[in-house]
Image: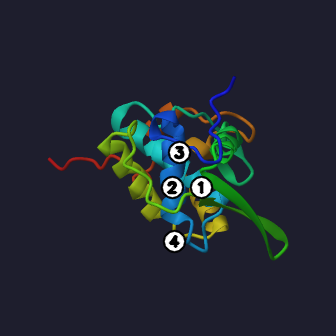
Amino acid sequence: MGSRALPNEKVTKEALSKSEEVYLRIIQSLQDNPNFCKTLFYKILYFSDFDYYERTGKSITEEEYRHITRGPAPRLFDVIIRGLKQKGLINEKRNPVGHVEQIRYHVVISKEIEQPKLLTSEEIAEIDRNIKRISGMLAWQASDYSHSDIPVKVTKKGEIIDYELVFYRSPMFSAVQPTKN
């Protein structure tokens, strides 16, 4: 039998994976931002993982990112979102915006989500940095911005983006600022 919570049961933080904690943090931070959509979500995840990798040699979510038309996209995004919806923690809304459909996510529980148990303070700071960096952009701006980052720029569409490419970034994208002698 699965560990799916009944409607009256509380889902505890212990039941969440590290990636789910990351997703919930981003959703809770941006759910009221009118620009927040799936594209911005992808870019915040990408820059959080790749910037953290550049600083530490490991990603936060351990997710693979594929180069798609609108830039980098986490390969397991739909799986993680589906899990959060099944646990009753988020819902998804689809709104027509012009000639496209905007997909937005909202935290279902009304109280503040507890402090993450699996994320370190450094990982939280990285995620928050990238929320601040990307959240003011429109979807097309975030896509264009991500296309200029070397790991995305040199990866063919449809292929997995190699984390090691962060070490060839331009200063504009580098998460590690050179030290002055």
Marks 3 and 2 close (CB-CB < 8 Å): no
Judged from the image, the secondary structure of the residue bearing numbered disc 1 is: helix
Q: CA distance from mark 3 to mark 4?
A: 33 Å
Q: How busy is the neighbourhood of tag 2: few (under 14 within 10 Å), some, or many (20 plus)?
A: many
Q: CA distance from mark 4 to mark 1?
A: 12 Å
Marks 3 and 1 close (CB-CB < 8 Å): no
**Of marks 4 and 2, which one's residue comes earlier in the chain?**
2
The answer to whether residue 78 shows anywhere in this view is yes
Name the spot of residue 78 as percent of width and height, x first.
71, 43
Judged from the image, the secondary structure of the residue bearing numbered disc 3 is: loop
**Of marks 3 and 4, which one's residue comes earlier in the chain?**
3
Residue at 48% over, 42% down: 49
Give the number of the mark in front: 4 or 1: 1
Q: Amino acid at mark 3?
A: Lys
Residue reaching furthest left?
Answer: 181
Judged from the image, the secondary structure of the residue bearing numbered disc 4 is: loop
Q: Amino acid at mark 1?
A: Phe
Residue at 56% over, 71% down: 32
Which residue is identified by label 2?
A: 26
Which residue is identified by label 4?
A: 136
Name the spot of residue 46 as percent of width and height, x first.
54, 46
Marks 2 and 1 close (CB-CB < 8 Å): yes
Q: CA distance from mark 3 to mark 2?
A: 21 Å
Judged from the image, the secondary structure of the residue bearing numbered disc 2 is: helix
Name the spot of residue 52 as percent of width and height, x first.
40, 41
**Of marks 2 and 1, which one's residue comes earlier in the chain?**
2
Which residue is identified by label 3?
A: 10
Q: How busy is the neighbourhood of tag 4: few (under 14 within 10 Å), some, or many (20 plus)?
A: some
Q: Amino acid at mark 4?
A: Gly
**Of marks 4 and 1, which one's residue comes earlier in the chain?**
1
Q: How busy is the neighbourhood of tag 3: few (under 14 within 10 Å), some, or many (20 plus)?
A: few
Q: How busy is the neighbourhood of tag 1: few (under 14 within 10 Å), some, or many (20 plus)?
A: many
